[in-house]
Amino acid sequence: MSTSTPPLTSYALAPTKAVSAGGITYAYRELGPTQEIPVVFFVHLAGTLDNWDPRIIDAIAQHRHVITFDQRGIGASTGSFPDTIEAAADDAYAFISALGYSRIDVFSFSLGGMIAQDLAVKHPSLIRKLVLTGTGPRGGKDIDNVAGTTYRDMVRATFAGADPKEFLFFHRDEVGKKAAKAFIRRLTERTADRDKGAKLSAFRTQLKAITRYGRSAPADLSVITGPTLIANGDNDRMVPSVLSEDMHRRIPGSELIIYPNSGHGGIFQYVEQFAPVAADFLKD
C-alpha cells in the first residue's frame, strides 16, 4: 500500500521559496507533480506571485509541475528590474538555470509574453511548449502606447475606487465589470504568506522597457518551432489583438484563440473555457 503524499495542486497553499543566481535572490512557488520539464509562468506588468489566476494555475498543476516566480526587482525578489526586455529574459534564464532546468514549458501573459519571446529567440532549445496570452511581438504596432494606456486607466480606476486591472484587463460593459470583480476576488483567495507588491520605481522601469521593446526591430519568431498556443480577447486595448494574429502568422504551426467581447484579460474573463484548453495543451 502506497503511503506517498499526493502532490500539492492548490496555488493558494503553495509555499514561497527562494533561490539565488548572479547575486539576485528570486522568490518563487511550485506545485503539481514533480517532473523533469516544468511549466514556468511569466507574469504581467507589475505582476507578482499573487497576480496569477488560481483557476488557471490549479488546472495546469493537476498534471504538470508548475513554477511561478518574481522577476528581478519585483515582489520579494531582490535587485532592480532591468531597463530592457532582453535583460529581463537573461534574468529569467539565470533563475531557470539556478533551479537546474535545461528544458521547460512556458505559460506567459502580457509583459511576461514579451520576456518569454526574447528568451525563446535567444535560447531556442530551452522552451519545448509555449503559451503566449495578451501579448505581442518585438516591434509590434502600438506596443509603445502601453504606458499611456496604463496611466490613463490607473487614473480612471482611482476615481472609480477600483483595482486598475478592472479597467486595463476588462471591458467596462456589464459583462466585463462582472468578470473583472470575479477575477479580483480570485486573486485574494490566498490569505497567508502573500507577496510584496511591485515598487513604483520598478513599475516605471517596466513601462520604459516595454516602450523600448515596441520601438525595436522585429525579432525572428520563426526560430520558435515547438508547439505554441496564442490567446487574447478580440479588443485588447493594451496590446492590440491584431498582434496576436501577427505572432500566429510568424510562429510556425502555432494555434490561435480569440475570445469575443473581451479585452487584455480575455483569458480571465473566459477562464472556465480557457483553463482546460491550456491544461490540455500543456499535458505531457
Image (cartoon, rainbow, N blue to C red):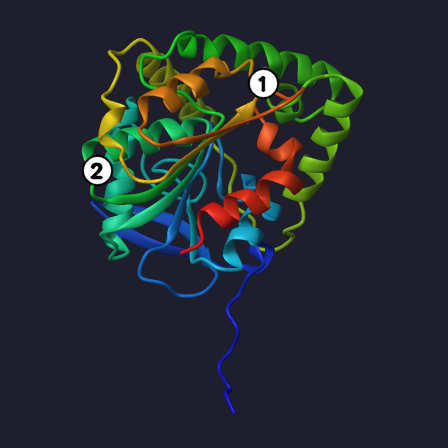
| Residue situated furthest right in the rendering | 174
Depicted 132 relative to depicted 6: above or below? above
Q: Can residue 81 be seen in this view?
A: no
Residue located at (72% from left, 16% from top): 172
Question: 73 or 63, which is in the foreground?
Answer: 63
Which three-letter amino acid code belongs to the residue tagged 2?
Answer: Pro
Residue located at (60% from left, 24% from top): 169
Instruction: Answer with mark 2 or mark 1, whichever residue precedes in sequence.
Output: 2
Quarter in which the C terminus is drawn: bottom left
Residue located at (29% from left, 31% from top): 88
Question: 250 or 76, which is in the foreground?
Answer: 250
Which three-letter amino acid code belongs to the residue tagged 1?
Answer: Asp
Q: What element carries label 2?
A: loop
Position of residue 186 in the picture relative to residue 267 (left or right) = right
Crowding at label 1, few (<14), some or many (≥20) Cα neighbours within 10 Å?
Answer: some
Residue position marked by numbered label 2 in the rendering? 124
Image x and y of residue 108, in percent = 43, 36
Depicted 90 relative to depicted 169: above or below? below
Image x and y of residue 49, in percent = 49, 44
Depicted 138 relative to depicted 181: above or below? above
Q: Can residue 148 be seen in this view?
A: yes
Depicted 174 relative to depicted 140: above or below? below
On residue 234, which mark appears?
A: 1
Q: What distance separates the C-alpha of mark 2 from that of mark 1?
A: 29 Å
Q: Quadrant of residue 10?
A: bottom right
Q: In which quarter of the image is residue 176?
A: top right
Image x and y of residue 177, in percent = 75, 24
Question: How many marks do you count on the picture?
Answer: 2
Question: 6 or 241, which is in the foreground?
Answer: 241
Q: Is mark 1 on a helix, strand or loop?
A: loop
Residue located at (63% from left, 12% from top): 155
Q: In which quarter of the image is residue 90?
A: top left
